[in-house]
Amino acid sequence: MSQPEPVRPAASPEKLSRREALAYTAAFGSAFLAAQGFAAEDVPAPAATQARPAVKKYDMKKSINLWALPYPQKMTLKQCFEICKDAGFDGVEVNYALEGDLSPEASPAHIKSIGDMARKIGLEISGVCSFLFWPYALSHEDPKRREKGLELAIQMVRAARLLGTDNLLVVPGATYVPWIENEPPVPFDVCDRRAKEAVRKLLPEAEKAGVYLNIENIFANGFLHTPDEINAFVDSFQSERVRVHFDTGNIAQYHFAEHWIPLLGKRIKNVHLKEYSKKVHEFNLHTFRPLLDGTTNWPAVLDALEKVGYRGHLIFEYFNPFPYWPEALVYQTSDALDRMLGRKG
């Protein structure tokens, strides 16, 4: 009787060409391709896996800016506060607008009731933020726009006091607004002079209200782009009421947050915790990512904040609420912060 033919292994598929391997790696990453069974010689070796950081507890508080939620389009202010509290946040950052709950059209009593409502729910108001510093820039070429901007900033100071927070984020000026075509640029020295004039006019109101004017570092305004520049600007007022609102993401295209923090030091009064991906080689709002879905070295950032004595709020800022189940972003962010701050192992 004849013996059966031995089963021969199927011929191996042809290996990826180097061009294909590079293209697939660029799209999916070498670690992903290796997990799909491609031989090591087919794809470049993945970068060494980062060791899991040791659990370390940081004495800082969790906050979130309400731009992360679809307010006021789909949610009320109360609903936003309740979701943030249920997710485990310690505070919320609110945004001053031209109309609505927190705006020039709102009465002092109504603004005060917002702070009262937040505290009743169990949240602090970690600060006041506003987009209005862009269209009504304190350094605008149009003097009427500058006048309107200063008027709005004074109202923001008063609103912060009514809300029960001592933090107002201030964008002091802009030499350039890239998303507005044909907007005339402002020379740097003119921007600097106008910004300082505006902050000096705000200072008496801030001192009276017990509110800090926290100067934010911005990526798109062409102004105060280094720690030395923002330190010199803040120190020029010789006032305890002018401090820094440090944003980790706004400098991330060319800089590293952990390098700025030691230089800013005790000037830091409030912090925007923005995730950024250096894998995207451009700078726009879409390069900001959900927390931990980026390239920020968070252990180094948190260590740097701890070393300068920062114990305030870490405010997650994100401009693209999820279109479906938007509350999921809030819960995901709270969980990420718990792990970062050592509240979870």
Image (spheres, rainbow, N blue to C red):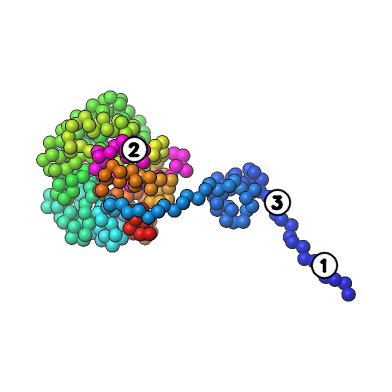
Residue 174 can be seen, yes or no: no
The region drawn magenta spans: 258-282
- Residue 190 is situated, as x and y percent measured from the top left of the image, at 26, 25
Q: The disc labelled 3 sits on which kind of residue?
A: Glu
- Residue 228 is situated, as x and y percent measured from the top left of the image, at 31, 31
- Residue 15 is situated, as x and y percent measured from the top left of the image, at 68, 50
- Viewer-side label of 2, 1: 2
Specify which label sits upstream in the sequence, 2 or 1. Answer: 1
Q: Which quadrant of the view contains residue 301?
A: top left
Q: Residue under circle 2? A: 260
142 versus 125 height, above or below: above
Mark 3, Cα crowd under 10 Å, few <14 / some 14-19 / many 20+, is: few
- Helix, strand or loop for disc 1: loop
In the image, which disc is placed on residue 14?
3
Whether 278 is among the magenta residues is yes
200 versus 341 height, above or below: above
Residue pictured at 80% horizontal, 66% vertical: 6
Residue pictured at 33% horizontal, 32% vertical: 226
